[in-house]
């Protein structure tokens, strides 16, 4: 029952955000008298997860979880471009940035789970239907809320062809963030593949500057996207900027940093080298190694 109530809560929150982002001059689709395109995207985001959940639960597998999440980002972006009559430089830029990130992350995570064989996050979840369904529903929520500020701009009829200072600054920030995330993920993957590093923690490369540089990069790139979308927003649409604190809370307190810190403490909590690394290295925001 708790999982079902949580699922309903996620759907309601996503619906309210979609309605807020659809205020003003927003593109509508000729379905049921004209439904806002952003609201349609919200529904599709959940629908994709629920459809893939069925065979995943029947086969007791989570192998396509991350891939489905990334493809949802990509599918919604393509759908918006198809159903939007006017494409501008800003809309194309936003779509390209979201698509590049989605393709890179989903393929990286999919290949990682293929190599590792399983995702330990789901070990105790898969046998329980409603709990497993909640995870899929939460991914639908994540796939819509995370890029919602970009989707709001893309579905707005106010979006223009003008390259503003926020566009340039936002693009630079995105490039920096994306580069940090890609390099950090690559460094950690290479580190883990080496047999010499089995049961060791990584403290080289970007990981000497931050204990979680990949998450820092991801936060930064979404801030960049928000800056690019900012001039298009108006009135209730500014609510979609809450996607930034959502991303930060998710990565730092829920699914990323918090869980990895706990896991690392269990593995190397008594290791003096790890304790020194933890003391001297920031958890998120990079700093030159001491």
Image (cartoon, rainbow, N blue to C red):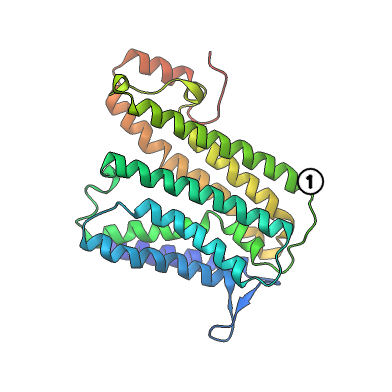
Whether residue 32 sits left or right of residue 272 in the image: it is right
Residue 216 on image: x %, y %: 53, 36
Whether residue 260 sits left or right of residue 116 in the image: it is right
The secondary structure type at the circle numbered 1 is helix
Q: Nearer the viewer, residue 17 or 107?
A: 107
Q: Quadrant of residue 3?
A: bottom left
Q: Is residue 20 visible?
A: no
Q: Which residue is mark 1?
A: 165
Which residue sits furthest bottom?
Answer: 33
Residue 71 on image: x %, y %: 45, 57
Q: Nearer the viewer, residue 78 or 207?
A: 78
Location of the N terminus by quadrant is bottom left
Residue at the location (49% across, 50% down)?
103
Q: Quadrant of residue 120?
A: top left
Q: Is 142 drawn above or below residue 182 in the view shown?
A: below
Residue at the location (22% across, 47% down)?
123
Residue at the location (62% across, 45% down)?
223
Q: Is residue 195 visible?
A: yes
């Amino acid at each position: 029952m708790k999982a079902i109530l949580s699922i309903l809560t996620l759907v309601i929150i996503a619906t309210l955000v979609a309605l807020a982002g659809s205020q003003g001059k927003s593109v509508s689709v000729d379905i049921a008298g004209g439904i806002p395109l952003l609201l349609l995207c919200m529904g599709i985001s959940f629908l994709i997860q629920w459809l893939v959940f069925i065979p995943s639960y029947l086969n007791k597998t989570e192998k396509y979880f991350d891939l489905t999440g990334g493809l949802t980002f990509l599918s919604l972006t393509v759908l918006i471009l198809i159903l939007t009559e006017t494409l501008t430089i800003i809309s194309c830029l936003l779509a390209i940035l979201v698509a590049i990130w989605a393709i890179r992350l989903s393929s990286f995570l999919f290949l990682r789970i293929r190599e590792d064989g399983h995702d330990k996050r789901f070990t105790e979840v898969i046998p329980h239907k409603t709990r497993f369904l909640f995870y899929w529903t939460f991914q639908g929520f994540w796939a819509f809320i995370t890029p919602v500020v970009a989707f709001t701009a893309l579905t707005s009829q106010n979006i223009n062809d003008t390259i503003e200072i926020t566009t340039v600054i936002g693009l630079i920030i995105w490039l920096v963030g994306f580069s940090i995330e890609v390099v950090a993920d690559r460094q950690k993957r290479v580190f883990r593949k080496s047999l010499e590093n089995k049961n060791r923690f990584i403290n080289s490369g970007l990981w000497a500057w931050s204990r979680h540089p990949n998450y820092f990069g991801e936060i930064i790139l979404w801030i960049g996207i928000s800056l690019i979308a900012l001039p298009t927003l108006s009135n209730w649409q500014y609510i979609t900027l809450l996607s930034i604190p959502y991303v930060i809370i998710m990565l730092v307190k829920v699914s990323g940093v918090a869980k990895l810190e706990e896991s690392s403490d269990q593995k190397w909590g008594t290791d003096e080298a790890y304790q020194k690394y933890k003391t001297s290295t920031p958890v998120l925001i990079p700093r030159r190694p001491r």
